């Protein structure tokens, strides 16, 4: 009898496409959460959605099935359970609501455009140029990527376009030049390290300039409102306040990641000679490479909003529109073809799983879960009687780490930031409100470090396969704490010197 059970189990495991033990754990988590009494202040359907969201995250972490399948599971459960609507038609509409998000399509199109760099050879050429300049050590290449981010950040209001659409293809090309490829199982050579540096430069530079990511102007508005207009962050003021702590983070970040995820190839003494030889072999720029350069230049100018600066706001284009324009230009010029678009599996995989996570986060906000969380946090802090420094620390940490519940920085900031700033303004002495609000402003970008769905850039880089989910979450948590400490200590001293407190 026992032998038959074992045989049946082995047959089942050989046939089913999921891992049984993680699947059982995930099911237990879902059932436990659903049977848990609904917390006061929440409706039953809102708590049910919390259960679905947390279960989905657990299933993804435990790798029950590929992440796209787990995302589809969430869509199916939300549709069947009808937690967001009283009808099946309304539930499926809610479950699919995020797939019309411009952000999601910006991510998809950015991945598709990056294929052109590989196909034309321009990506390899750029990678080899970086190796020729900084290739003696892998960490030097990491600093090169960080510098790219820093140079582009003031002029690129889409952090997704910058980190995922511009810098990431360069990073992939550099990794490819060292034969570091997830498809071959060699991503650990340099690819994992460079992908992490590529990503973690993105939140830091997003914190340094108002124009470095789309939600920052909203942060400026909320800070002004919560402070009674006493603290208004102009472009120059923001850049000055974030300059020193941001530069310290950029300086130390590649070194910290080298400790957390060291590349297998640390020293590359022959890399410079190799790169120069390969560049000579490639010869001058080809026609399609020139088209790629032209398209990238056009996109950068439009992403930097240069036409609007010259001719007025009428000429402002949404970053997603610019991305589609760039992709269309590549197709009609024959730089890439439609088969290239269809065969880019990582883009369509990302569309599914990121769209599902964005949907869950949006519905949590819609059903009042985020407002409930914020209100309870506010009331608990107000009743605690703790000192202002502890209040400020708890507010910043709670705001930052609640980003585990969000797949969009804009949604997170819109839902929670003003409430947290207002509580801080009420409970913190006026002399210390400015550094608190500056920490909140920095934290609104630093929180992007946490997950593979934290912002538009993360699914692009994570989807390329260089970094496992475990590595991503572990490094993300450490870097988040590390950068918060840098901004609190270095930033606090810097803001004191500048006269903000």
Image: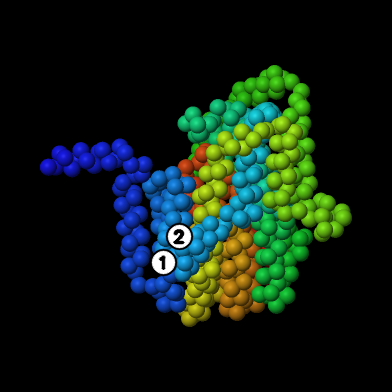
Q: Residue at x 42, y 58 (%)?
A: 77
Q: Is residue 180 depicted above or below 422 in this figure? A: above
Q: Residue at x 72, y 59 (%)?
A: 210
Q: Which disc is residue 230 wearing? A: none
Location of residue 204 in the rendering, given as x and y in whole percent from the top left corner:
63, 52
Q: In terms of depth relative to the viewer, which is nearer, 307 or 88?
A: 88
Q: Earlier in the sequence, mark 2 or mark 1?
A: 1
Q: How many numbered circles does the render carry?
A: 2
Closer mark to the observer between disc 2 and disc 1: 2
In-image side of 421 versus 89 (left or right): right
Q: Which quadrant of the figure contains the N terminus?
A: top left
In-image side of 18 versus 192 (left or right): left
Location of residue 184 in the rendering, given as x and y in whole percent from the top left corner:
49, 29
Q: Is residue 12 depicted above or below 178 in this figure? A: below
What's the CA distance linking mark 2 and mark 1? 12 Å
Give SS at disc 2: helix
Q: Which residue reaches farthest left?
A: 1
Q: Colour scheme of this structure image? A: rainbow
Q: Is residue 49 depicted above or below 454 in this figure? A: below
Q: Residues within 10 Å of mark 1 (few under 14, many from 20)?
A: many
Q: Which quadrant of the figure contains the C terminus?
A: bottom right
Q: Which disc is residue 48 wearing? A: 1
Residue tagged by mark 2? 79
Location of residue 133 in the rendering, given as x and y in whole percent from the top left corner:
69, 31
Give SS at disc 1: helix
């Amino acid at each position: 009898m026992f032998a038959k059970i074992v045989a049946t189990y082995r047959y089942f495991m050989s046939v089913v496409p999921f891992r049984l033990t993680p699947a059982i754990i995930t099911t237990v988590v879902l059932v436990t959460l659903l049977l848990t009494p609904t917390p006061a202040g929440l409706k039953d359907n809102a708590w049910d959605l919390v259960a679905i969201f947390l279960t989905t995250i657990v299933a993804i972490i435990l790798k029950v099935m590929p992440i796209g399948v787990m995302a589809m599971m969430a869509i199916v459960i939300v549709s069947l359970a009808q937690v967001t609507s009283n009808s099946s038609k309304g539930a499926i509409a809610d479950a699919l609501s995020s797939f019309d998000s411009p952000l999601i399509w910006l991510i998809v199109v950015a991945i598709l455009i990056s294929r052109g760099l590989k196909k034309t050879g321009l990506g390899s050429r750029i990678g080899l140029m970086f190796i020729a300049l900084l290739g003696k050590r892998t960490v030097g290449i990491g600093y090169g990527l960080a510098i790219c981010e820093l140079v582009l950040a003031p002029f690129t209001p889409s952090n997704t376009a910058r980190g995922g659409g511009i810098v990431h293809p360069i990073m992939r090309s550099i990794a490819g030049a060292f034969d570091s490829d997830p498809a071959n199982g060699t991503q650990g050579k340099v690819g994992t390290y460079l992908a992490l540096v590529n990503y973690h430069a993105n939140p830091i530079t997003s914190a340094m300039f108002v124009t470095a990511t789309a939600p920052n102007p909203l942060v400026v508005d909320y800070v002004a409102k919560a402070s009674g207009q006493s603290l208004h962050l102009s472009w120059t003021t923001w850049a000055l306040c974030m300059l020193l702590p941001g530069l310290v983070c950029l300086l130390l970040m590649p070194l910290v990641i080298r400790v957390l995820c060291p590349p297998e190839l640390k020293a590359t003494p022959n890399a410079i000679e190799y790169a120069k030889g390969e560049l000579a072999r490639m010869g001058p720029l080809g026609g399609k490479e020139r088209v790629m350069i032209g398209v990238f230049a056009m996109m950068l100018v439009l992403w930097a909003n240069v036409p609007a600066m010259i001719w007025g706001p009428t000429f402002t284009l949404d970053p997603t529109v610019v991305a589609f324009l760039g992709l269309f230009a590549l197709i009609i010029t024959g730089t890439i073809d439609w088969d290239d678009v269809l065969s880019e599996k990582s883009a369509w995989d990302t569309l599914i799983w990121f769209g599902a996570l964005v949907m869950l986060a949006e519905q949590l906000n819609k059903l009042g879960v985020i407002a409930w969380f914020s209100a309870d946090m506010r009331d608990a802090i107000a009743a605690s009687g703790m000192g202002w420094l502890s209040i400020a620390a708890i507010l910043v940490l709670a705001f930052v780490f609640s980003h585990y519940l969000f797949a969009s920085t804009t949604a997170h900031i819109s839902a929670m930031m003003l409430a947290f700033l207002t509580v801080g303004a009420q409970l913190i002495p006026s002399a210390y409100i400015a550094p608190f609000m500056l920490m909140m402003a920095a934290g609104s970008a630093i929180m992007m470090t946490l997950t593979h769905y934290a912002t538009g850039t993360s699914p692009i880089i994570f989807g390329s396969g260089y970094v496992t989910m475990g590595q991503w979450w572990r490094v993300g948590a450490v870097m988040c704490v590390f950068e918060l400490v840098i901004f609190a200590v270095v930033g606090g001293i810097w803001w004191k010197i500048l006269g903000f407190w």
